[in-house]
Amino acid sequence: MTQSHPFRSIVAETLLIPLYMRAKESRRKNPILYDPTAERLAESLDYDYSPFEGAKLSEVGCVVRGWYFDNAVRRFIRSHVHPVVVNVGCGLDTRYQRVGQGTGATFYDLDLPEVIDLRRRLIPESPDNPYIAASLLETDWMDTLRSRHPEASFIFVVEGVLMYFYEKQVRAFLHQIATRFGGGEIWFDVCGTMMSRHGVKPDSLRKHEAQIRSGLCNGHLVEQWEPALHLLDQANYMKFFRRRWGFFFGQILGRIPWLCYRFSSLLGYEITANNHSV
């Protein structure tokens, strides 16, 4: 039986894009990302996904991004004694189901209250996968996590989110994380300045009202914003699974990183400071 959910926020509604792309990918033979939970969730919602059809770059990009961040989380869990994973702006992501079960790590999923209400209806919470209803711009949830897990090492994944916020908001968020979670990591994706400055949208958003409000091309710029953050990796999507992108994007454009970064990047940072005060 399907159910409908009228979204109050146009940004919240974008959570259906990666969900649908993961579900579609999961049905392929030899998928980049196998996600049977996403298949079930996409089928359970009464929603017209047809505007996302034909968004070929987003179709591959969403699952490459999920695969990339899954691998970052796996590495972090293997290399830390008390790992805590925080999916910020989680939407209907299923990272806990893909990589978290049985690892001993705690996976928090955080999003706006209307999204968490929907999550709770579709994906019941578990002791290892609790939910937080809050905005990433708030700080109470950060202090709560820090006090709840004083010995833990935290990894934050902010997937498909920060481009909807202004640069000032992004910088404030990164500062609040960096001042509290030394010894951890934060991974996120960004649009490049070619998109943010010229109003260019990903192909999956061209019929959607959501706007790209910030972008950056050089991952080292974040180190200037926040010296506690040390760049671990900046990757362009098209260096991975080249055949799936097609000849031009995979074999030509994907081999020119600086040009790809003008459109999008995948970024990871170590939080080098160990200062829990703001």
Image (cartoon, rainbow, N blue to C red):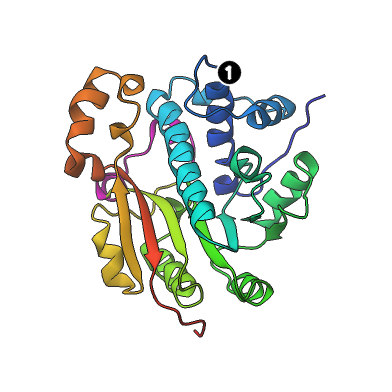
- The residue drawn where x is 74% and y is 28% is 44
Q: Nearer the viewer, residue 203 or 133?
A: 133
- The residue drawn where x is 75% and y is 33% is 4
Residue 210 can be seen, yes or no: no
Q: Nearer the viewer, residue 235 or 103?
A: 103
Q: Is residue 197 left or right of residue 75?
A: left
Q: Amino acid at mark 1?
A: Arg
Name the spot of residue 254 as percent of width and height, x first. 23, 32
- The residue drawn where x is 47% and y is 32% is 63
Above or below, 13 against 248 in this view is: below
Q: Which residue is mark 1?
A: 27
Above or below, 273 against 132 in this view is: below
Q: Nearer the viewer, residue 129 or 193?
A: 129
Q: Quadrant of residue 42?
A: top right
Q: Which residues are magenta?
A: 193-209
Residue 230 can be seen, yes or no: yes
Residue 199 lies in the magenta stretch: yes
Name the spot of residue 100 as percent of width and height, x first. 63, 46
Q: Is residue 163 left or right of residue 15?
A: left
